[in-house]
Amino acid sequence: MLPLFLGSIIYNKRREMNLTQIELANDICTQNTISKIEKHNIAPTVNILIKICLKLGLTLNDVFSDFSSKSSAKEESILDEIERDVLLKQTSSIDERMSSLEGKLSNNDMKQYELIRGVVDYSNDNYDVSLFNLDKVLQFTKSANDDVYTLLAYLFKGLNYLGQEHNDRAQYYFQMIDDSVDEDSKLSNASDLEILFICKTLAASYNEMNLPKESFGFSQCGLRFAHSEHVSYFLDELNYQAALALKDDKDEKQNYEDHYNLALYLAKSNKNDSLLAKMNL
C-alpha cells in the first residue's frame, strides 16, 4: 500500500524547485506517470522513485521513513531484536543479551536462538561450531521449507562452506533454498528483513562464485520484493550485486550503469561505508 503522503512530498518538492511534471519526468519516466504518482494513483517502482529522489534532492528517509520501518510498529521479542541486529551486523553485547535468555525460552524459540548462535559463530570464523548449531536449527524446524529458519540455516551453512572455499558444498545449500521457494511461496514467519537478507546474501555469494546469472536473479527477486512491500532494507547492496552480475555483459551496459549508479546513491545516502569501500570510493 502506497503511503498517502508520498505523492504530496514529490508534488511539494517539485513545486518548490519550480519544475513542471514534464521536466521532472525527463530521462526518468513519462509525465503521465509523475501525475499518477502525485495523485496517489500508482506506486512508483523503486528505480523510478530513486531517480525522482536524485533529481529532487530527497533522501529515501524523506519518503520511506513511515513504511520502511513498519515492522518496528509491532511489538518485537528480545530474540527478534537480537536477530535483527545480528543480520544488520550490529553485534555489540550480543553474547550478554543471549546469555540473559538461557532457561527462559520455549521450544518454539529455540530454532531462532540456535540460528543466532550459528550466525555469530560464523561471523567469528568458528565454522565447525556454527555448522553444529545450524544443524540444531534444522532439527527444530524439521527442515520444513515454509519455515524461514530452515532457509536461514541453509544460507549460513552455505556461507560457512564458502568461507572454507568448498564452493560445491556451498552451492548445494544455496540450491536448497532456490528449490524450496519461488516468488509465490509463503513464509508465514518471515520478516521483510529476513527475506531481503536472504536475497542480497545469495546474490553476493553467487557473484563471489562467478555465477552472474544466479546472482542477478536473486538481486532482482529482492528488488521486486522491496518494491511490492515498500521496504528499503539492502537496496544499495541489491543494486550493487545486480551491477556486478551485469558488469561483463556488453549487451547490458545501460542496465549495469543504472544499477551501479543507484547503488552508489543509496550507499552514500545510507552511509554504507563498507559498500562504498568495495566501490573504491
Image: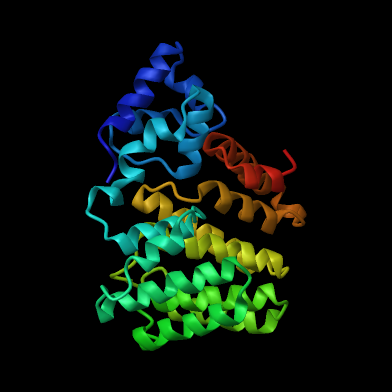
Residue 90 image point, x, y percent? 49, 52
How many marks are shown on the rendered structure? Answer: 0
State the image quarter where residue 102 is shown.
bottom left
In the displayed structure, 255 sits above or below 113; it is above
Name the foreground residue: 267 vs 256. 267
How far across and how far down the image is residue 19, in percent?
Answer: 46, 15
Identity of the residue drawn at 30% across and 69% down: 189
Q: Nearer the viewer, residue 107 or 67?
A: 107
Q: Residue at x 40, y 57 (%)?
A: 84
| One can see residue 181 in this view | no
Residue 102 in sight = yes
Q: Is residue 23 left or right of residue 261?
A: left
> How is the model colour-coded?
rainbow
Measured along the vertical axis of the image, is residue 258 above or below residue 149?
Answer: above
Q: Quadrant of residue 217?
A: bottom right
Seen in the picture, residue 82 relative to 160 is either above or below; the reply is above
Q: Percent x, y for residue 171?
A: 62, 79
| Residue closest to the eye, 125 or 100 | 100
Name the side, left or right, on which 173 lies relative to 105: right
Left or right: where does residue 130 sit relative to residue 95?
Answer: right
**Closest to the observer: 190 or 133?**
133
The quarter in which the C terminus is drawn is: top right
**Which residue lies at the image location 73% right of the left edge and 77% below the top edge?**
165
